[in-house]
Image (cartoon, grey):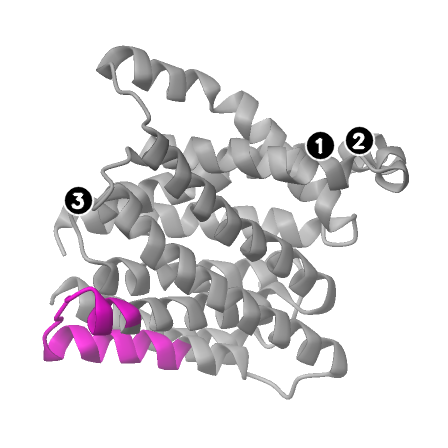
Amino acid sequence: MSPFALVLVLSSAVAHASWNLLSKQAAKADGIVFIWLVAVASTVLWSPPALGYLILTGARLSWTGAGVIVASTALHLGYFLLLQRGYRHGDLSMVYPIARGTGPLLASLVAILFLGEHPGPVGITGILLVGTGVLLLGAARRPSRADLAGIGFGLATGLFIAGYTVWDKQVVSAFAVAPILLSYGGEFCRALALTPSALTARRRDLLLPVWREHRTRVLGAAVLVPLSYLLVLIAFTFSPVSVVAPVREIGVLVAVVLGGRLLAEGDLRRRLLAAAVIVGGVVTIALS
């Protein structure tokens, strides 16, 4: 992995863990309302950069490009809804590692089996270390009944992570859709798709209260969600999935610290010890 790609992916990991902290803090709010507010705010805030890109480059989005963005949106929508449900039941430092660990391992496996990527022995060792460390983090203590529900949603979330990771790599490479257009298009389509559910009679009355209580979290996530993934999409344009996806999981370390320090979730020492395995995996992959 090139130094530039490494900087992109590590920066993405920090941004990703940060917006997940915001999402966890808003977990008691209606999930669809919160996700819709974030998507709408993201669409508004990221319109100038997206329009600026189109004007400066003269790029045009084809019907094929629009279609693959819609498919990507469906995968991301499942991911966001399941993740928010997971945070209603489990700790940030429990759900996040399981979701983030399951996804990249499956994504790397698909990339190796079906996309013709062939990481060497060092790269494979790094991938396995990252996966082992993430799974150890998730099992750092005996889970409660609520944790079991969170773990279940975390595993389901991981399947969607694997799906959109592999698909979006093809969108920005094989279909040559610009990363910023994929990121912005995903936010716009997600807001559009959730509008009917968010504006039902039951949820309309929740919009203003959720916005008032979580306004800072909504706006923070609206900036960080597209930014974290845009950095990864840029790395995808010149780096393989089997390398980018596992290195991104350094965000697990950040999430564990945030969960332990800011949310008082406990087991910080044991979870950090397990997370140290991830650092070894990241270094190994970076040197492969």
Question: In the image, which disc is placed on residue 215?
Answer: 1
**Disc 1: CA contacts within 10 A as few (<14), some (14-19) or many (>=20):** some
Whether residue 47 is visible: yes
Q: Residue at x 46, y 58 (%)?
A: 254
Q: Position of residue 57 (x, y in %)?
A: 23, 16
Which residue range is magenta in the image? 110-133
Q: Nearer the viewer, residue 119 or 26?
A: 119
Callout 1 secondary element: helix
Amino acid found under the numbered disc labelled 3: Phe
Q: Considering only order in the chain, which callout, 2 or 3, is on the residue closer to the N terminus?
A: 3
Q: CA distance from mark 1 to mark 2?
A: 5 Å
**Contact (Cβ within 8 Å) of mark 3 with mark 2:** no
Q: Secondary structure at mark 3?
A: helix
| Residue behind mark 3 | 4
Question: Which secondary structure is most common in the magenta stretch?
Answer: helix
* Image spot of residue 222 (x, y percent): 56, 34
Q: Is residue 44 magenta?
A: no
Q: Residue 285 appears in which quarter of the rendering? A: bottom left
Residue drawn 52% across and 49% down? 74
User: Which label belongs to residue 212?
Assistant: 2
The one nearer the camera, 56 or 93, is 56
Q: Is residue 118 magenta?
A: yes
Q: How far apart are the two marked residues, 1 and 3, measured between alpha carbons?
A: 34 Å
**Structural crowding at the residue carrying mark 2, measured as other residues with C-alpha within 10 Å and reported as few (<14), some (14–19) or many (≥20):** few
Q: As displayed, is residue 135 above or below residue 218?
A: below
Q: Separation of disc 3 and disc 2 at Cα?
A: 39 Å
In the rendered structure, the answer to whether residue 32 lies left or right of residue 244 reads: right
Q: Tell me whether the residue at label 1 lies in contact with that at label 2, contact meaning CB atoms closer than 8 angstroms.
A: yes
Q: Position of residue 215 (x, y in %)?
A: 71, 32
Amino acid type, label 1: Arg
The residue under label 2 is which amino acid type?
Arg
Residue 273 seen in render = no
